[in-house]
Image (cartoon, helix red, strand yellow):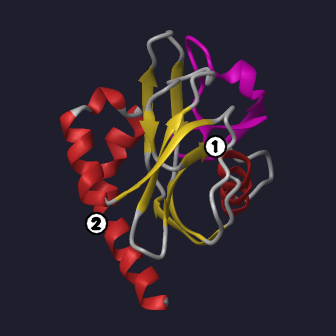
């Protein structure tokens, strides 16, 4: 189940995830998370080819939908474990008001209030192949250049939020490096 929200972000109901994503998708709550490591790197992933929306595109570390009554922090931890076999800490909501509407090549519309998080990896990766086709550790400047060079190869939400997120990633990485 996903949480339906109004334009102010207030919950207005719930609907099954399978039913909510279609040709005309009601606005609902989701999240995106960018994972950094102790070496100052940023994790990007390529969505599995079996994914219903945007299969095979590169994106942030992972995404998901909080369940009814689930906190966003708990949802971030749950999806990190499910998609990447990864434990995370220092979860920070960097862009709380980010939202977008986009339509993929199959015609499925996304319409999400999608707060963007940054978290620190504290375990090794063990990606779930049903969710993730590939992973790559990179830097924020390298990712910015890749997005500018080939925006079509990346998820529309990453392309839309990365310019606002990039300076915040750098600040978070500095904090991570100072903690070591």
Disc 1, disc 2: CB below 8 Å?
Answer: no
Give the label on residue 64, or none.
Answer: 1
Separation of residues labelled 1 and 2 (CA atoms): 23 Å
Residue at the disc numbered 2: 167
Q: How many neighbours does mark 1 have within 10 angstroms: few (below 14), some (14-19), or many (20 or more)?
A: some
Residue 178, horizontal then vertical, whole percent: 42, 90
Callout 2 secondary element = helix
Is residue 10 inside the magenta stretch? Answer: yes
Quarter residue 155 falls in: top left
User: As displayed, is residue 34 above or below residue 123?
Assistant: above
Residue 24, horizontal then vertical, whole percent: 56, 14
User: As displayed, is residue 48 above or below residue 143?
Assistant: above
Is residue 107 inside the magenta stretch? Answer: no
Q: Quadrant of the N terminus?
A: top right
Residue 82, horizontal then vertical, whole percent: 73, 48
* Residue 175 in view (yes/no): yes
| Residue 99 placement, left or right of 84 | left
Please report the bounds of the magenta region as a residue range. 1-30
């Amino acid at each position: 189940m996903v949480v339906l929200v109004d334009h102010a972000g207030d919950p207005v109901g719930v609907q099954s995830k399978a039913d909510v994503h279609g040709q005309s998708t009601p606005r609902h709550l989701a999240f995106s998370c960018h994972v950094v490591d102790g070496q100052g790197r940023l994790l990007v992933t390529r969505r599995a080819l079996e994914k219903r929306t945007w299969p095979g595109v590169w994106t942030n570390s992972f995404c998901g939908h909080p369940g009814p009554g689930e906190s966003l922090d708990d949802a971030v931890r749950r999806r990190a474990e499910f998609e990447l076999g990864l434990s995370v800490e220092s979860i920070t909501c960097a862009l709380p008001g980010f939202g977008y509407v986009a339509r993929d090549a199959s015609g499925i519309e996304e319409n999400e209030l999608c707060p963007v998080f940054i978290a620190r990896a504290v375990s090794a990766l063990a990606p779930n192949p049903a969710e993730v086709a590939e992973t790559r550790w990179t830097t924020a400047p390298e990712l910015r250049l890749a997005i500018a060079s080939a925006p079509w190869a990346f998820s529309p939400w990453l392309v839309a939020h990365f310019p606002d997120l990039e300076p915040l990633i750098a600040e978070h990485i500095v904090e991570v490096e100072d903690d070591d």
